[in-house]
Amino acid sequence: MAAVDVPVALLGYGTVGAAVHRLLEESADEIERATGHRLRVTRALVRDTGKDRGFSPGPGVLTDDIQVILGDPSIQVVAEVMGGVEPAGSHVLELLRSGRPVVTANKQLVARRGTELFEAAAAGGVQLRFEASVCAAIPVIKVLRESLIVTNVHRVLGIVNGTTNFILSAMEEGRSYDDALAEAQRLGFAEADPTEDVGGLDAAAKTAILATVAFGSRVPLEWVEVEGIEGVTLDHVAAARALDMHVKLIGRATLVGDRVDVRVGPAFVDGHHPLAAVEGAFNAVMLHGDAIREITLEGPGAGGIETASAVVADMVSVVGTTGTGFLQNDPVWRHLERLPPGDLTSPFYLRLEVEDRAGVLARIAQELAAESVSVAQLVQQTADDRAVLHIVTHDAAAGRVNAALTAIRALPEARGEATAIPVISSRGVAELGWA
Amino acid sequence: MAAVDVPVALLGYGTVGAAVHRLLEESADEIERATGHRLRVTRALVRDTGKDRGFSPGPGVLTDDIQVILGDPSIQVVAEVMGGVEPAGSHVLELLRSGRPVVTANKQLVARRGTELFEAAAAGGVQLRFEASVCAAIPVIKVLRESLIVTNVHRVLGIVNGTTNFILSAMEEGRSYDDALAEAQRLGFAEADPTEDVGGLDAAAKTAILATVAFGSRVPLEWVEVEGIEGVTLDHVAAARALDMHVKLIGRATLVGDRVDVRVGPAFVDGHHPLAAVEGAFNAVMLHGDAIREITLEGPGAGGIETASAVVADMVSVVGTTGTGFLQNDPVWRHLERLPPGDLTSPFYLRLEVEDRAGVLARIAQELAAESVSVAQLVQQTADDRAVLHIVTHDAAAGRVNAALTAIRALPEARGEATAIPVISSRGVAELGWA
């Protein structure tokens, strides 16, 4: 079969855009073998066509006018790699409406404006692919939509932010949060303003997208309960290690009956759990389904070339399925309600500082019992006149654990902090061993 | 778009076949949403049409005559789930030649007769998909062929046999090899005759397929250097634990320049390596590529429903790409030579039992040096008149390590066994710590 030339366009020509262009050129033979087509970048939208660039886009490719791309009927796929919600969103909408398939690497765009985008794709009769928007080169969207098509996925657990995982891994080696953050910034894993990452907002956008695709129901970003890692201390890290656990920032999406819970926050992950071994800036996503039990995908969740690799794979998949109707559907096909955030149950680790005096343990046990929080394990450490209680609970509703903590903080014996962190374990919590 | 009815056929209607049929019926809506088509099993080839079956195939579906399927032009995809090299191979060849796309779960068939099969697929202008032939529901073939299309994958490391991983995990808990094997048999993880699994032959077929797809060059089963786990002792397991390592049966495919090395055998896997955490009957495959660094996929590598889930996903992918030419190519597109097996380098763990007398260490060091095997770490344990030497080497060629072992066994001071096991570590071996 003779190769068919397929003109494609890029929106954006920064690190990722230039890498997409380079990969398309370097891998033209591989792509032709798989698809019968050669993908050629004929247009790339940039703000400043005169700027000096590392990878030369070729004469006449750069344009600062989206109308040039919209008006070029030869262009068969467009990759959006410019980032930001606007003007990227308007461009993508116009392209989809005009019947042009789009591939995007933009998590904020997909998380915030997925409804509009998929409506436009359906109206235009074309695909919108977004693999690179979640965990770069880890092909979790393709696996969810194509490999697990007959598996009812009911739970997604992920380490979807490399910056926080790097910081928490460094804290396990004894560094303070501030030191670890500074190191991450020095190595380029964290931005100068790290709020998006350490505050859990980046993970929230990715987890919302994963939940939407896994459950087939739109999960708005506002539904995600978000807690960052700013409150994680070396005391928490040490307590986790004593339980053969690791503190990780976990994105969790859970189908409870026909309601959805999505949250991002620090968790204690059992050392035997597949996510426990994910170290440094790596990402991993674990999918629980009926037919497949669980599948975990791990790899680099960021990086220009990794992101570009996922963008190119999506472009190839679009070209490889054009005209078949395959995956032209909106991943959303049902409307599930949100589970009230306090209702989600899991085991918890509690760290309580109290005055070391007779009767205090009974008071705490009473407050926990009042909220039906039952204790699986308890270890007490004493120093001076103070006791630190480490408690692992059985499954308990998040809201009731918080209510118990509020009551415990109000006790006259309370000292220092009282914190709760969910526990993720494949074993029963009663079997955990304290070191 | 109105749903289009797509008649499909099964070769075989055992556990996997019946599960494929059930999943196609239960997930008909999901499949229609993704493809616009409803897949309906209209024929299933069995040996005995009168046999009692758990899931009813419906009237007129069962046939014991392949000609009924070959002669039915309405059938658009055929799934081969009968197993065995013959008659499955002849049936698949005829179907492909007649222009019918085929999905197979048969690792022996793909590993042994891939050349013929892919030639027939190319001649018939149709796809041959084989996701379920390697690690059941773990979508490693799709990820290699579709997601990593622009990444030059140069190394594949896998735990691709659940039986041996279960046995080795049980040995870490202190059970003997025989006890662990009996337990695996009792739980249904191992056959009454476990040779295929414990001897590494099952892993060899899967690793040959993975190498073929990853490197784009045919890797015949005969090229795979195979060692089973029968020689692994509790001494090895204890030595691994002392190094914070785990003994695993690893399938390894390595591109060395433009030559290929493929082997299956026990290895010491560093506790910080993603494969170290794979416990029990689970499988995992790690892909090293240029653009993506490494991606690891983990999940259940066997099971009727898991295998069926992968078969159905392949059938859906075939239907979703029909007429596009996508992935109609033979994954083999170049001819790479085999690396002589002795040439592959890696660090090794050596366990040597010798008489505890002056000068013996010097003799051993001399024999290692004669083969250019350099020592990174050495620990000596003494008991009675005997010393056990635990050695971790720097990178060394497998052939030279074996030559050194042969020389050491011939020393007058040699006692008991002298064994070498490759070490897989993401850290430098000099940094490993002995507990």
Image (tube, coloured by chain):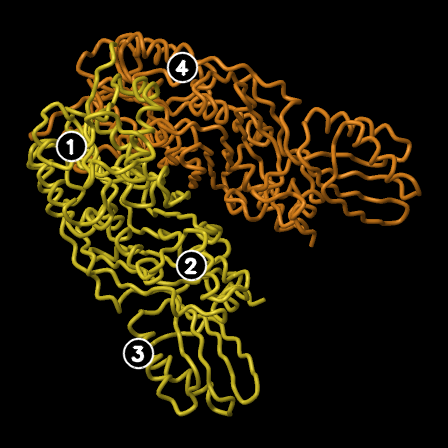
Chain colours: A orange, B yellow
Residue B325 seen in this snapshot: yes
What chain is tagged by disc 2?
Answer: B
Whole-angstrom CA distance, mark 2 to mark 3, is: 24 Å
Q: Is residue B401 left or right of residue A30?
A: right
Q: Residues within 10 Å of mark 2 (few under 14, many from 20)?
A: many
Whole-angstrom CA distance, mark 4 to mark 1, is: 30 Å
Circle 2: element type: strand
In the image, B43 versus A432, the foreground residue is B43
What chain is tagged by disc 1?
Answer: B
Check disc 3 and report the residue beneath it.
B403
Q: Residue at x 43, y 48 (%)?
A: B282
**Amino acid found under the numbered disc labelled 3:** Ala
* Pointer 1 with pointer 3, Cβ within 8 A: no
Q: Position of residue B156 (x, y in %)?
A: 32, 51
**Amino acid found under the numbered disc labelled 1:** Pro
In the image, B387 versus A107, the foreground residue is B387
Whole-angstrom CA distance, mark 1 to mark 3, is: 49 Å
Judged by depth in the image, the label closer to the viewer, 4 or 3, is 4
Q: Position of residue B417 (x, y in %)?
A: 41, 79
Q: Which mark is residue B248?
A: 2
Q: Residue at x 30, y 45 (%)?
A: B134
Disc with the residue nearer the chain's start (2 vs 3) = 2
* Pointer 4 with pointer 3, Cβ within 8 A: no
- In which quadrant is the C terminus of chain B drawn? bottom right
Q: Is residue A171 left or right of residue B289?
A: right
Check disc 4 and report the residue beneath it.
A333
